[in-house]
Image (spheres, helix red, strand yellow):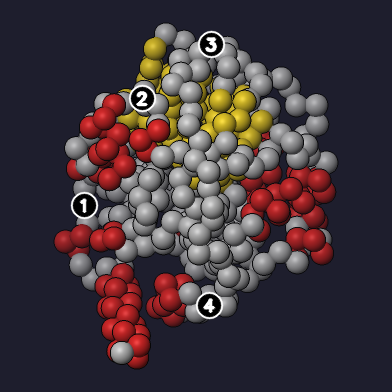
């Protein structure tokens, strides 16, 4: 009986893998037009692109072998990756209903989902409460439970959606939020079509455009370096972005979304809108073969330190790690590597430190950083024995 179950499981896995590989080369019917508009320096009339170059977001990492073999090893977990726990215990938090004035409380729910409470507003970034992230109930399974139960969420006023990948634009979660709270949803061009398919409405903006939430509070859609797709063939039909939330006092908020480094100029552009009190910067899913330190689409801790420095942020919380297994590195490698790099480059480990899942974190108003990491040391620090020992 056990042998039969193994054969059935292997057959199902093979069929699902075959379907995932097939959609990368065959069916045009899976393509979708999410946005129609004029050409720009990042839209060719049909698809969006990164102005600083696109090649590295397509290229497999060195040593990955052929595309089919790489995806098979990745999907089956047969690439020699370090073990992850099957689950991580979490004591869910119960946020305050509202946080008024200049107080800022940030609660990491998991992955790229952050609850931000300030100025009487409750803000969610890339909310996902789903157990799996992917199409047709297939995809990486949640390892770390949400830091806040959905039913314990206060009424949400504003939702920021960075792009249309399943782990960032989660339609079931958006449907529940919309049915319950009718929040304002802000995203980048084209993603409103997918949000509408979930029964919700969104304001979709181009890079550099903004929308006023209330007097003194506005959201600016800002550039980053990534790509978008739900079915491979619809690649880059919708735009990806980061966000600046301008506040009346205390400093701004910055949400990087999901990003590679690209030309590295976009953090400086975001900082140009005013001093950043708190930045949310991804640090995980950077390794797809042993020893890799970044990918074209995802920054690792090294480039996260660069972005932190270029933002000039007073504080930052690392996101996009430890919730879903999306890559090769061990679960605790991203925060361990981040702390080592900050110490090595002279940065302040207390200003860019992980937040406990579900633990409300009070963020002080903006003050100019007393010390900043030395970017010139990052590449050398990445070669240190401490970093090399991290799988």
Q: Distance between the residues labelled 3 and 1?
A: 43 Å
Residue 372 location (% of width, % of height): 77, 34
Q: Distance between the residues labelled 3 and 2?
A: 17 Å
Q: Name the residue under label 4.
A: 79
Location of the N terminus (image quadrant): bottom left
Residue 270 vs 127, above or below: the answer is: above
At numbered mark 4, what does the secondary structure look like: helix, strand or loop?
loop
Q: Mark 3 points at which residue?
A: 101
Mark in front: 1 vs 2? 2
Q: Which label sits on residue 155?
A: 2
Q: Distance between the residues labelled 3 and 4?
A: 50 Å
Sequence-first disc among 3 and 4 = 4
Q: Are marks 4 and 2 in contact (CB under 8 Å)?
A: no
Q: Which label sits on residue 356?
A: none
Sequence-first disc among 3 and 2 = 3
Q: How far apart are marks 1 and 2 (CA)?
A: 33 Å
Q: Name the residue under label 1.
A: 32
Q: Can residue 10 be seen in this view?
A: yes
Q: Are marks 1 and 4 in contact (CB under 8 Å)?
A: no
Residue 130 location (% of width, % of height): 35, 50
Residue 186 as seen in the image, left or right of residue 115: left
Residue 187 location (% of width, % of height): 35, 34
Residue 241 location (% of width, % of height): 44, 39
Q: In which quarter of the image is residue 215?
A: top left
Mark in front: 4 vs 2? 2
């Amino acid at each position: 009986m056990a042998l039969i179950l193994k054969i059935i499981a292997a057959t199902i896995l093979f069929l699902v893998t075959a379907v995932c590989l097939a959609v990368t080369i065959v069916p045009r019917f899976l393509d979708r037009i999410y946005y129609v508009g004029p050409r720009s320096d990042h839209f060719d009339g049909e698809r969006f692109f990164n102005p600083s170059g696109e090649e590295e977001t397509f290229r497999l990492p060195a040593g990955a072998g052929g595309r089919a073999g790489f995806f098979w090893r990745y999907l089956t977990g047969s690439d020699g990756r370090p073990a992850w726990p099957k689950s991580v215990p979490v004591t869910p938090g119960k946020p305050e209903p509202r946080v008024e004035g200049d107080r800022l409380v940030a609660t990491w729910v998991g992955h790229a989902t952050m609850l931000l409470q300030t100025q009487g507003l409750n803000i969610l970034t890339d909310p996902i409460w789903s157990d799996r992230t992917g199409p047709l109930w297939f995809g990486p399974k949640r390892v770390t439970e949400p830091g806040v139960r959905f039913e314990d969420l206060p009424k949400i006023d504003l939702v920021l959606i960075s792009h249309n990948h399943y782990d960032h634009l989660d339609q079931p979660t958006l449907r529940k939020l919309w049915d319950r709270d009718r929040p304002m949803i802000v995203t980048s061009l084209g993603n409103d079509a997918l949000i509408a398919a979930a029964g919700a409405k969104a304001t979709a903006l181009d890079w550099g455009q903004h929308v006023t939430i209330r007097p003194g509070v506005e959201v600016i859609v800002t550039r980053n370096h990534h790509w978008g797709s739900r079915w491979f063939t619809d690649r880059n039909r919708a735009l990806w972005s980061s966000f600046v939330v301008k506040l009346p006092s205390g400093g701004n908020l910055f949400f990087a979304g999901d990003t590679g480094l690209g030309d590295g100029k976009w953090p400086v552009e975001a900082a140009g809108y005013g001093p950043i009190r708190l930045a949310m910067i991804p640090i995980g899913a950077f390794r797809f073969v042993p020893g890799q330190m970044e990918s074209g689409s995802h920054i690792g801790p090294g480039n996260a330190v660069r972005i932190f420095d270029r933002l000039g942020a007073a504080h930052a919380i690392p996101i996009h790690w430890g919730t879903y297994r999306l890559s090769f590195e061990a679960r605790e490698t991203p925060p361990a590597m981040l702390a080592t790099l900050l110490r090595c480059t002279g940065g302040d480990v207390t200003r860019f430190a992980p937040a406990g899942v579900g633990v409300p974190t009070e963020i002080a108003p903006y003050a100019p950083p007393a010390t900043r990491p030395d970017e010139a040391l990052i590449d050398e620090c990445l070669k240190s024995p401490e970093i090399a020992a991290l799988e």
